[in-house]
Image: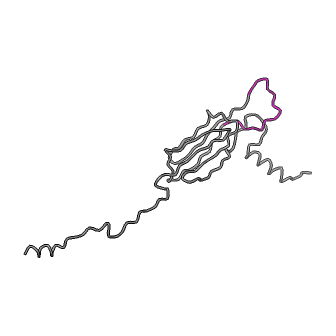
Amino acid sequence: MLRFDPFSDIDSIAKSLLGADVGAGRVPRFMPMDLYRVNDHYVLNADLPGVDPGTVDVSVDHGMLTLSATRTASSDENMQWLASERFAGSYRRQLALGENIDADRISATHNNGVLSVTIPIAEQAKPRRIEISRAGDSEQTMINPTREHDSNR
């Protein structure tokens, strides 16, 4: 007799998609992050626990912000794994930046396993106050050519 268990099928699909197989050297599938705006810039915080800051790379190319990092797995020939649930391998996340970003002023810091990227808004995209001039201030007084001609008579 065959038994059909739809939940075990869904569980196996989820494990394969999320990389939930037990074993050293599992490859991470995502880099959790928060993105929010504060005044004239955006802040992106990405969780990178256990990642050596020297392996973290932040780059911008053709309007694409790329975050990448690598966490190496512990390896020792005398080590016998009892449980291995932490990802090891390369993390990579890409975000398309809008035209209103000042890509030359993007900065990043790494502190306590959190990568913080500050993304400034370009000056031309910031709200600004428009000066209103009086209509008479910009007009020049024109000399009436016929009147000038009349005075020479």
Predominant SS along the magenta part = loop
Along the line of sight, which residue is nearer the eye, 6 or 37?
37
Horizontal relation, residue 24 to residue 92: left or right: right
Quarter of the view holding residue 142: bottom left
Q: Residue furthest left?
A: 153
Residue 16: x and y in percent read 75, 45
Residue 144 to residue 29: above or below: below
Quarter of the view holding residue 111: top right
Q: Residue furthest top?
A: 78
Number of numbered discs: 0
Quarter of the view holding residue 70: top right
Magenta stretch contains residue 136: no
Magenta stretch contains residue 88: yes
Q: Residue furthest right?
A: 1
Q: Quadrant of the C terminus?
A: bottom left
Horizontal relation, residue 152 to residue 116: left or right: left
- Which residue is found at the position 50% from the left and 46% from the top? 103
- Which residue is found at the position 19% from the left and 71% from the top? 143
What colour-coding does the image apply? one colour
Along the line of sight, which residue is nearer the eye, 5 or 152?
152
Residue 55: x and y in percent read 62, 34
Residue 79: x and y in percent read 79, 26
- Which residue is found at the position 66% from the left and 41% from the top? 114
Question: Which region is colored magenta?
Answer: 75-89
Along the line of sight, which residue is nearer the eye, 139 or 84?
139
